[in-house]
Image: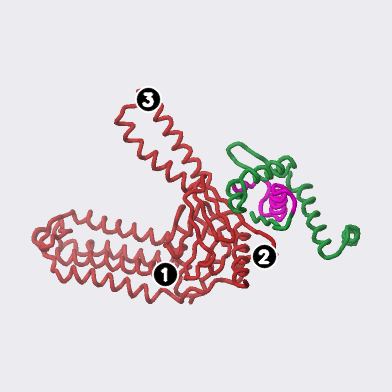
Amino acid sequence: MNPGTNTPALTPPSRRTAALWGLTVSVALAAGPLLLRHRLPDPIAVHWDLGLGPDRSMPLAASATMDVALWAAVWVTLLVMVPAVSGRRGARAGWWGALVGSSALFLGMGATTLLANLDAPSWTEARLPAWQAAAVLAAAVAAAVSAARLRRGGPDGPGDAACAPPELLLRPGQRAVWVGRAGNRWLSAVTAAAGTGLGLLGLLWALGLVGDGTAAEVLPGLVIVLAAGLFTSSLTARVTEEGLAIGFGPFGWPVRRIRLDRVQRAWAETRSPVEVGGWGFRGLPGDATIMLRGGECLVVGYRSGGRLAISVDDAERAASLINALLAERVGA
Amino acid sequence: MLLTLDLNDTRPLHEQVAAAVRRAIGEGSYAAGDRLPPARELAQALGINTNTVLRALRDLRDEGLLEFRRGRGVSVAGAAEGRALLVQRARELLEDAQRHGYRREDLITILKELP
């Protein structure tokens, strides 16, 4: 369903690969200190200053646990991102680079830390050769870059013809426009709650029931939630001869305008917040999604190769109209 | 919601807008209970006054096609899928028939011949 996935079978990141990979790295990170514990001081040196003298220590068990925990955080994040990065080449390359590069960094740092501490009588005697620190960084960067290049897969296809929206014929002497909206009930509720809270706070503060200090502490949080909610809880989109305009929030402001001459074609797609990494403005410029709710999304493909997806009702008709207006423009 | 206006249409603008909204709902882009885009947005897209759109929407509410609810905006009425949509589609069918040179009687004959 996702246009641009016509790539060789080996390249899309799979959850299984990521899970096995991460487990292997975790085991390796834990096994090193465990196997060498009789030859290591406890606590061990875990950090060196720029003169490469040790300046911080940690109990061996705590250090090993922290390494595994930090790695697990990176690993789980990458695992969650798998469906979101399968579609586009740039995203795939970045994902593989992050997985392999961060693994190399964690394993390299773990190994050099153990080597420096190996057979040292106490953590203050642990010496870290400068070349090792440099080599770990260089190896991590090299691993990330080569993994990104090797596993990125084929270039993105021009898009799947199967998901082309139905063709719309514009008659001469006819003016056709499309207007759509999307909203998120939960975000609206949170926004309304923040607004109510703000009003209540003002009232209590004016009555002297809430101290100045408490009010000042709560105020910024409420204002931020209210402001963010006002701009992101709903959107309206319209397609006219001038192009696509997306208005954020209940007031339709700010507006993002995309002129038709920048657009190659449009189509409708089903996307969910899990796929794109959450709600709000997601992804990178060139492959972004404005996600308010899962379901129907209008996707515009730019002439420059990028694309923008907007979660909005009745997206297929919008895509049909954009394509019809583009065809009319070419014909004229 | 896809709205089309005929630039040569001589009917009052609010009637044309009402017909366009009726047509859009008839085409099935909005089901019963679905919320319509705000009137201000519709007006901006069409390049007309918001009051004209509001008048059209009020007419459609009086027809029973739309529902106005406080805080929920304008939505398609529960009973809309029935007669109101059928009448709109019949009206379009008749216009189409006349464009192709068929009279009302010919259309009725065609309907009768359908299994």
Q: Chain of mark 2?
A: A
Q: Is residue A136 above or below residue B84?
A: below
Query: Which image quadrant for residue A99?
Result: bottom left
Q: Secondary structure at mark 1?
A: helix
Answer left or right for A16 relative to B18: left
Residue appearing at x 28%, y 65% in the figure: A28
**Which chain did the image draw in red?**
A
| Residue A13 covered by magenta stretch | no
Marks 2 and 3 sit apart, C-alpha to C-alpha, by 59 Å
Give the residues in magenta.
B10-37
Circles 2 and 3, Cβ within 8 Å, touching? The answer is no
Please tell me which residue is depicted at 61% across the width and 45% down the height of the picture.
Answer: B50
Whether callout 1 and callout 2 share a subunit is answered yes
Residue identified by numbered label 3: A206
Residue A290 shown left or right of residue B13 in the figure: left
Q: Secondary structure at mark 3?
A: helix
Task: Say what amino acid the circle numbered 2 marks.
Answer: Leu
The vertical placement of A316 against A157, above or below, is: above
Which of the labelled discs sits on residue A90, or is there none?
1
- Earlier along the polypeptide chain: callout 1 or callout 2? 1
From this view, report whether residue A135 is shown above or below residue A53: below
Q: Which tint was used for chain B?
A: green
